[in-house]
Image (tube, grey):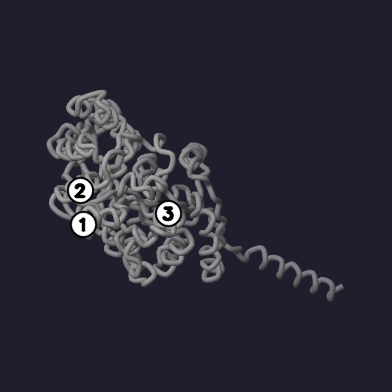
Amino acid sequence: MRRWLGVLGLVAFVAGCAASRPGPVKLRMWAMGREGEVVGELVRDFERGHPGIRVEVQQIPWTAAHEKLLTAVVGGSLPDVGQLGNSWISEFGTLESLVPLDPFLVRGELSRDAYFGGIWDTNVLDGVTYGVPWYVDTRLLFYRKDMLERAGYKSMPTDWKGWKECLRAVKARGGPGHYGIFLPTNEWMTPVVLGLQSGSPLLADGGTRGAFEEAAYRRAFDYYLGMFREGLAPAIGFNEIANKYQELSRGTFAMMVTGPWELGEFTRRLPDSLQSQWSTAAMPGPDGPGVSFAGGSSLVLFHGTKHPEEAWELVRFLSEPAQQVRFWRLTGDLPARREAWADTALTADARTRAFGDQLTRTEPCPMVPEWEEIATRVYEQADRAIRGATSPDSALATLDRLVDKMLEKRRWLAARRSAAGHRGRT
């Protein structure tokens, strides 16, 4: 009996130890699109280096991501860590669904200096950092070198005056039915980038009113419309062109403004005879190389996570230069960390290297939740002006009126905060 009691006691002791021994921390991560497909490869290496952490990655289609995130905010079912398009940072930061990262950043493990400044700033809202750039996106020029050479240009001009002269020369060389550039009239990126280059804030009074009628944006808008007035760009949208790669191959136009995903698309879609005849160049600016759009996706910690330290460890791991380069090889997404651009696979390719150059000159769009709706109104009014449905002055006045209406609640909140602050001082 004493022997059995001893055995039972030992069993109970072992069972108690097993029950009290903590299991691995389980993190939930949401990632979108192609990134969600491949990040699992990086996560497995993270788990091997952090045996006490397990990560469950859920891939979400970009088309469903925004709605799913909002549903999770309302339902309190957000994951621990996730990918967030940096144009969404302001919206989800305003909803208080993101964990401020400054308490982690003061440790010195990651800092703004390690990133492209304009990209980092897309993650900062009212002085609080809510995300760490994961990969970056911007816009620059893709062009046919042979068409420019036939027009007398060995390289892309770097300022507005030279750019327009180049477009005129290309069009003159091509003749009727040919253009210098394809600028889809149903895309907001180019008129916004030109506005940023011209020094326009796009929004005024702390992001509470439109600034499109101000002189800086008027200058950019006139330059943009001039490309259509002179016939340097066809007045068509994406839905009015069957195949832009085919038209570029035919020489219908010589260049377009687009993003890094086109590096692979141009390689796949242009004929072999043109593979040595296309290149990329940074955006021309009013008086020299200009700024472009600061885009991409960031890594965030979601409010409600029970494992912020472990989630931060995952963010740190995915932010390492070696992991950034590996992620680029898997997805084609450009690294956010400056150190990653020392990799010769990136710097040896002149077409990719142009993106590295442009990324040193980027600016974020206004950090307001309404920005995506505002951007839609930008191209709608620009399209109307391009097609002669309204005058440029009327288009800008309408744009400011529509934007002011969208931001009415923001002005009301700002007034309340100001009044509360004044009462507090008195």
Which residue is denoted by mark 3 in the rendering? 270
Residue 371 in the image, given as x and y percentages of width and height: 32, 38
Residue 267 percent across, percent down from the top left:
43, 58
What is the quadrant of the C terminus in the image?
Answer: top left
- 10 Å neighbourhood of mark 1: few (<14), some, or many (≥20)? some
Q: Disc 3 versus disc 2: distance between alpha carbons?
A: 23 Å
**Secondary structure beneath disc 3?**
loop
Nearest the eye: 309 or 85: 85
- Dot 1 amino acid type: Tyr
x then y, percent, for residue 405: 27, 25
Q: In the figure, 363 relative to 22: above or below?
A: above
Q: Is residue 210 above or below residue 258?
A: above
Q: Residues within 10 Å of mark 2 (few under 14, many from 20)?
A: many
**Residue hosting label 1:** 153
- Quarter of the N terminus within the rendering: bottom right
Q: Is residue 304 left or right of residue 385?
A: right
Residue 297 seen anywhere in this rendered image of the structure: yes
